[in-house]
Amino acid sequence: MKIDSRFYALIAASLFGISAPLSKLLLGNIPPLQMAGLLYLGSGAVLLFVKFLRKVLKKEQTEASLQKTDFLWLFGAVISGGVLAPIALMYGLSETPAATASILLNFEAVATTFLAVLLFREHISRQVVVALVSLTFASLILALDTSGKLGFSLGALFVILACVLWGIDNNLTRNISSKDPTIIVIVKGLGAGSFSFVLSLLTGSHTPALSHAIYALTVGGICYGASLLLFILAMRGLGSARASTLFASAPFIGALASFLIFKDAPTIQFLISIPFILIGTFFLFKETHFHSHEHNNIEHDHSHSHSDEHHNHVHAYQEAANENHSHLHQHSSIIHFHNHMPDVHHRHEH
């Protein structure tokens, strides 16, 4: 049974959301930049172990391998989202009140959608716009500081810059989302994690206690590794705008997890945000997109089966064609009409 990509995005948001309260348990013992490095390292290390285990067990490879041109997109994603964005964020946090920074960080979904439409011509509907506004507004309510300690400075611009860089990261990753997501997470996790961890040591942090490091790596492997992998799968079927909009529910899920972990009573902001979260999610799941569209001749490699309208090529063993597999294959030009999202086969102009 094929899983709706929107569920991948929601599960990814849930895992990422619960990482915040779980990480908070250690923030008194590990500095934020070092924690970020360990979380990313954990994501890469766990997926590397999974990849190794599959090879030992001789599991069949159903995902397309990355080619040389794909690594240019991946390198750009690691540099923008794993290297430059954390630097911009750390500088921004040092000059900006925490409440202001929390609010501004919700700009990532907006930045991702804006770049997807402007640079990559990704189509978004009115439902997506309504969902983006609703989910972003819910996040702003959750981040609201009633103490009045808000402020705007040059540091705030660096927080916005970090969000733009993560938006670039999301869109660059979207361009290789049809390839093996495990390898993408391994490279992003180990690359970004190593950079942040080394940077934390160079800026004066001490190496963490072994028990603390293992905890952070474990949280990173589960909450970051699986989240990143599912987010890539979501972008494969939804495009970056819709996947990022659904991912904007992460602060709400993180707040809910915090109440459960720390036994706090739900805040008034949390209760007010609930209907906006539900409205945004409803519009994204309600969205349908029908029109006659043309597929040009294309040859590409990605994981697929022959149970859809876009793969009708012949195999020597045709009974295996309905199972997921990957190989270089040709799509002939076709014009047809059906419900679709901006997935790997539907990134056409509107």
Image: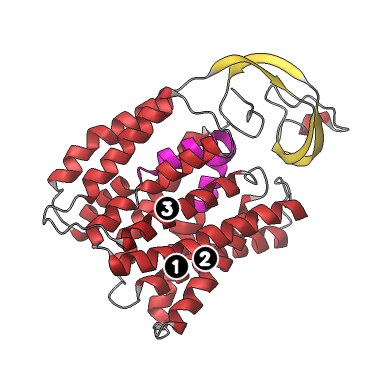
CA separation in Å, label 2 and label 1 = 7 Å
Q: Position of residue 232 (x, y in %)?
A: 56, 46
The quarter in which the C terminus is drawn is top right
CA separation in Å, label 1 and label 3 = 12 Å
Badge 3 amino acid: Cys
Q: In screen coordinates, is 332 left or right of 218?
A: right
Q: In screen coordinates, is 95 left or right of 219?
A: left
Q: Position of residue 254 (x, y in %)?
A: 30, 52
Q: In screen coordinates, is 208 left or right of 342?
A: left
Q: Where is mark 1, residue-wise?
A: 87
Vertical order, 37 against 9 (above or below) = below
User: What residue span does the magenta drawing correspond to?
Assistant: 227-249
Badge 2 amino acid: Val
The answer to whether residue 10 of the structure is visible from this angle is: no
Residue 83 numbered tag: 2
Q: Where is mark 3, residue-wise?
A: 163
User: Number of labelled discs?
Assistant: 3
Q: Quadrant location of residue 337?
A: top right
Circles 2, 1 touching at the beta carbon (< 8 Å): yes
Q: Is residue 184 magenta?
A: no
SS class of the residue under badge 2? Answer: helix
Badge 1 amino acid: Ile
